[in-house]
Amino acid sequence: MPKKEIVLEDIPGVGIKIAEKLREIGYTDPMTIAVTAPSELAAIAEIGEGQAAKIINALRQMLEIGYESADKILERRKAVAKISTGCKNLNILLGGGVETQAITECYGQYGSGKTQIGFQLATAVQLPKDKGGLEGNCLWIDTEQTFRPERIVQIAKALKLDPEKTLKNVFIARAYNSEHQVFLIERAPEMIEENKIKLIVIDSLTSHFRADFVGRGELAERQQKLNKHLHQLQRLADANNLAVYITNQVMARPNILFGDPIAPVGGHVLGHMATYRMYLRRGREGTRISRLVDSPGLPEGEAVFRISEKGIVDP
């Protein structure tokens, strides 16, 4: 479904001041506004919820959002692109690489390679399309102080990219708690538009949510906020045809007597929202094993890779 050219000032309920406010916060894409909840738009644009609902409903009519035939969806899927992981095995497992318009989650114990895949993607996204990139830049939210620019430099050299230019195309924000993390994603549209962002990395998604909401009494509130946060990420991926890569922590289940007791944090909320879920674990002789746990169109399978100075490579 092609987007109609809509000027913000032409939307019923949007005047010059509100249009300026929406542009300030990066909400320039009519589709992004149309799929935003009225309460969310009201808070972001500092307007009444009734007015926000009026703007959203008017936009939905103008964009003719509703049912459409599957052939149109197939045509739109042709715009989906892939970012190469640098490893043939991993690319095959993911059907060509990390997909745009989707959330790809990697979970596993510390040292399993989750962050290293993030470094690889943040660099590879800058490559030309014929070399596995998207000719775009990366937005990285660091929640655990794990971002290391030195790794970007190493991988950039291996990919024959200018290290200094590559570093300038990765935009980092340190999130200090879950509220700050949510705020950074709410303000992401402006960064996406100004800096040709084609990849968002959150490392890790669940760290602050685990720390800020402790105990069963706060579990419901944690899951609600996490759910909203994930929906915001998916909307950004859809509206801007970008890829979202998130890492996730794990927990041990002591009641599991047989099999792997490791389970990802985030429960069913994260399980349902992640388009692709990969479980990483250490293999023999320094290798890592990635298991595709969930995907809407790919079979379950495993891939072996190695972490080297050059980045993610085949063993």
Image (cartoon, helix red, strand yellow):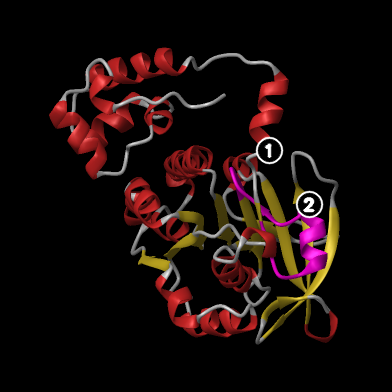
Residue plotted at (40% across, 51% down): 192
Q: In this view, does 64 lie above or below 20?
A: above
In the image, what residue type sits under mark 1? Lys
Instruction: Report the side of 302 relative to 65 (left or right).
Output: right
| Membership of 64 in magenta stretch | no
In the rendering, at what x and y percent does residue 24 appear?
Answer: 22, 44
- Quadrant where the C terminus sits is bottom right
Element under label 2?
loop
Quarter of the figure with residue 43: top left
Which of discs 2 and 1 lies nearer the camera? The answer is: 1
Magenta extent: 83-103
- Specify the label residue 87 is tagged with: none
Asked whether 20 or 262 is in front, the reply is 20
Q: Earlier in the sequence, mark 2 or mark 1?
A: 1
- Quadrant where the N terminus sits is top right
Asked whether 5 or 152 is in front, the reply is 5
Element under label 1?
loop
In the rendering, at what x and y percent does residue 259 appear?
Answer: 84, 60
Instruction: Report the side of 279 relative to 211 (left or right).
Output: right
Residue 84 visible in the current orientation: no
In the rendering, at what x and y percent does residue 95 appear?
Answer: 78, 51
Residue under pointer 2: 95
- Specify the label residue 78 is tagged with: 1
Instruction: Report the side of 177 relative to 48 (left or right).
Output: right
In the image, what residue type sits under mark 2? Gly
Instruction: Give the Cα distance between marks 2 and 1.
Output: 14 Å
Residue plotted at (68% across, 29% down): 75
Residue plotted at (52% across, 44% down): 237
Do the residues under discs 2 and 1 have CB atoms within 8 angstroms? no
Q: In this view, does 3 lie above or below 61?
A: below
Q: Is residue 172 above or below residue 15?
A: below
Residue 274 visible in the current orientation: yes
